[in-house]
Image: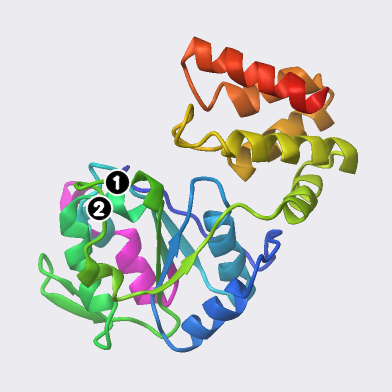
Amino acid sequence: MNAHAETREGADAPFYLPQRDEVAVFEAAARNDLPVLLKGPTGCGKTRFVTHMAARLGRPLYTVACHDDLSASDLIGRYLLKGGETVWVDGPLTRAVREGAICYLDEVVEARKDVTVVLHPLTDDRRILPIDRTGEELEAAPGFMLVASYNPGYQNILKTLKPSTRQRFVAMEFDFPPPEQERAIVVQESGIDERRAALLVRLAGKLRALKGQDLEEGVSTRLVVYAATLVAGGMDLNRAISVAMIEPLTDDADIKRGLADLVVAVLG
């Protein structure tokens, strides 16, 4: 089954720098078997947060990267031919339900509409997963938790969550960290020095201010870390900014020239 990506995390929690009380909220939701919805722009740390929390809680994590062709069968499972026999193979959601793991649906609005129907009985007090193909009705094992994320900035009439779905989750809004926190993240993740990290973060703030004008989306913390990693590895600062913070944002030659001018103004 190639419609999903599956990851299992170990006991060591990856680095995550909290912005507010999101760790406490997630832990409270986990204790009370509540599903969680994370809202925020691309690359602001939602996936890292879930990975961190799964390790912190000591729970297995199944991560599903949602896309246009992702169906309910990709999550639940299907019959496959193996060695001349037809056998049932659980999907990542079913495995998480059986094992008491966390199932994380990244960018859930990108999935097909039949996916949300499957989620409904898992996000109320029933906590069940009906599997029509096998006739099973699985009760979620202790520890099972459903987490989903999406970017409200990309919402339109065809790509949104229905209110009936959103209101089944405890929801938290994420955004890019304030400059001092983002600088600390960049230093920790890349090994770059404080001075150049501060320059990159300052530039990121200027680029984000262009969202909705010249740019469809602002530069993510992930891209800032990429640029810093290249610089820490010996790449020229301007070249690292070009390949990690400018080129990924746009294909328009005029806009890229304008962004290059902005880089010069910020870096001096």
Q: Pointer 2: residues within 10 angstroms few (<14), some, or many (20+)?
A: some
**Would residue 42 appear left or right of 222 to someone viewing this image?**
left
Q: For the residue labelled by badge 2, is the local secondary structure a helix, a strand or a loop?
A: helix
Look at the image and tell me whether residue 219 can be seen. no
The disc labelled 1 sits on which kind of residue? Met
Amino acid found under the numbered disc labelled 2: Asp
Give 148 or 153, whichever is nearer the viewer.
153
Report x, y in % for residue 98.
35, 75
Above or below for 201 versus 145: above
The residue drawn where x is 21% and y is 59% is: 115
- Residue 174 in the image: state x and y as whole percent: 53, 60
Q: Are marks 1 and 2 in contact (CB under 8 Å)?
A: yes
Q: Is residue 74 visible?
A: yes
User: Mark 1: which secondary structure?
Assistant: loop
| Position of residue 249 measured from the top left corner of the image (x, y, whole percent) | 52, 27
Quadrant containing the C terminus in the rendered view:
top right
Q: Is residue 29 left or right of residue 71?
A: right
Q: N-terminal of the two: label 1 or label 2?
A: 1
Q: Give the labeled residue for mark 2.
A: 74
Which of the two marks, 1 or 2, is nearer to us in this view?
Answer: 2
**Residue 31 against residue 109 in the figure, above or below:** below
| The image quarter in which residue 263 lies | top right
Q: Which residues are magenta?
A: 80-102
Residue 120 placement: quadrant: bottom left
